[in-house]
Image (cartoon, grey):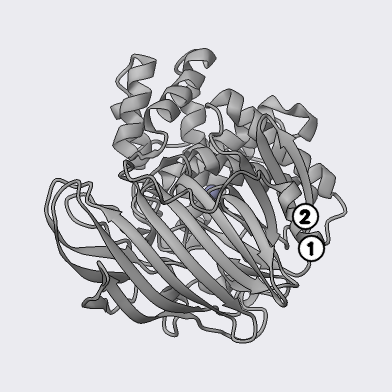
Amino acid sequence: MKKIIFLLALFFVIPLFFVGCQNNKSSLNCYQIQAVFNDETNSLECVENIKYYNNSENALNEVCFFLYPNIFNEGQSPVPKYIESKAYINDLSYGNITFLSVLSNDSETNYYVNEQGNILTVEIPQIYPDEFIEIELHYTVFLANIKHRLGFGNHTYNFGNFFPIACVYENGFVKNDFSPNGDPFYSDMANFNVKITYPKDYILASTGNVVSNDSANMITSVCVAENVRDFCFVLSKEFKILNKMVDGVSVNYFYYDDLNAEKHLQTAIDALLTFNDLFGKYPYNVLNIVKNDFCFGGMEYPNLVMISDDLADDETINYVIVHEIAHQWWYGIVGNNEFENPWVDEGITEYSTALFFEKNQIYGLNYQTIMENALYGYNNFVKVFKKIYGSVEQSMNRNLNQFDTEPEYVNCTYTKGMLLFDSLRQTMSYKKFIKCFKDYFEKYKFQNSSADKLIQSFSRTSGVNLESFFDAWLSGKVILETIDK
Ligand SMILES: [Zn+2]
């Protein structure tokens, strides 16, 4: 009972149970998921009902879904080789998604999963534009013992991308490949109503607003999130929670083993307020910062960011918190195909992080120093790769699987992306420069953007055609001046 009261006190308590999927006027897809977690089998049994709207201009006979859990199947590569020892704390471990049945409008229907395991295709009776269909998926997700978005370590069970999510439709369904680099995700805004049942000794952090009830041994939490492009949750027996209401947003830090927890909650609050001011207001009423077993620095989901528990020092932790919260604006609210053009969200997010430290000098990171270090790091990468491989591909406009190595991916999307925006800043007044971000956010919030849309939006606000500027950077033609240290 104490836990329930605690959770009720922590989150907004409004009638949540039957909102989320009840708005018949909405043409956002609606996911209703019932999930039961079993920590003995490390699995999640789910029934997922999707009200899928045909927002295309074509009649549809099938709907495709992206299946992230299968990246953990034997024979796949969920992480780059050199990270394996950090990701698998025990031996190699596997996971997947197994379907029990698939229904369309209450009748069993044909479905198939492709050879790679990344795409589920469900056959449906034909639906015309603006019509919808109800698809019901019965499946079990088995978690690998891996410190990843989906998987578990010694402290947390992570449920990022655990459910089949509808592929975006653009002249056909966009079927992203798996990739061990980056975030191979792309989705439309949707409404979620997710009911999660789990053993009583766990504490839940999730996307959306939560109401919990307990029975003898289990807790059932109903999580409602509207107008978000994904849903994620994390469970841990060790979570402690710090909470502060800021500007109508309940900011929560779920953590274990953190002597500076208050400070890290404050970093998240500072990031929220800074980006509200710089880009436009965060439109949700909850933001969760969740420490977890994770082999990369951090990961962004709507209303929830994962922060790895193996970050080395306070400066890095603050940097990752700010970076992941910036993603709430760039990926979360303004979406893009992260597989096809990862620089679009990573470049702007990394640059937003530098803007944060420029605005918040108390953190001791200087904007100019961040840019100099980025330039130095980038040139070092070019120098080393030239020595090893004889040449180095420096273009930014590649999909995730066109980057041969992790350093190539990180340098050409994050670092070069940040340097691109710094260079753009030199071409106009600071006021106009920031207005480019504000206008871009306003125009594409709750939608999907793209590289072209970003360039057009920045051109419109600046009053200058920026196509050749961006093209020079994206194609790798720009030669960056060397800094010797
Ligand atoms: Zn990022």
Report the amino acid beneath label 2: Ile
Identified at 55% across, 28% down, the residue is: 281
**Foreground residue, 298 or 21?**
21
In this figure, which residue is indicated by the disc labeled 2?
5
Report the amino acid beneath label 1: Met
Label 2 C-beta lies within 8 Å of the nearest ligand 1 atom = no
Q: As drawn, is 365 to the left or to the right of 299?
A: right
* Image coords of residue 54 (percent x, y): 22, 51
Residue 19: assigned label: none
Identified at 68% across, 32% down, the residue is: 357
Give above or below for 95 relative to 420: below
Identified at 41% across, 67% down, the residue is: 48
Circle 1 SS class: loop
Identified at 54% across, 59% down, the residue is: 232
The number of callouts visible is 2
Mark 2 Cα-neighbour bin, 10 Å: few <14, some 14–19, many ≥20: few
Give above or below for 411 relative to 370: below
**Foreground residue, 399 or 202?**
202
Q: As drawn, is 291 to the left or to the right of 484?
A: right
Q: Quadrant of residue 374?
A: top right
Q: As drawn, is 397 to the left or to the right of 286?
A: left
Give yes or no for contact between labels 2 and 1 (Cβ–Cβ under 8 Å): yes
* Image coords of residue 319 (percent x, y): 68, 44
In this figure, which residue is indicated by the disc labeled 1?
1
**Foreground residue, 326 or 371?**
326
**Foreground residue, 475 or 67?**
67
Give above or below for 285 relative to 78: above
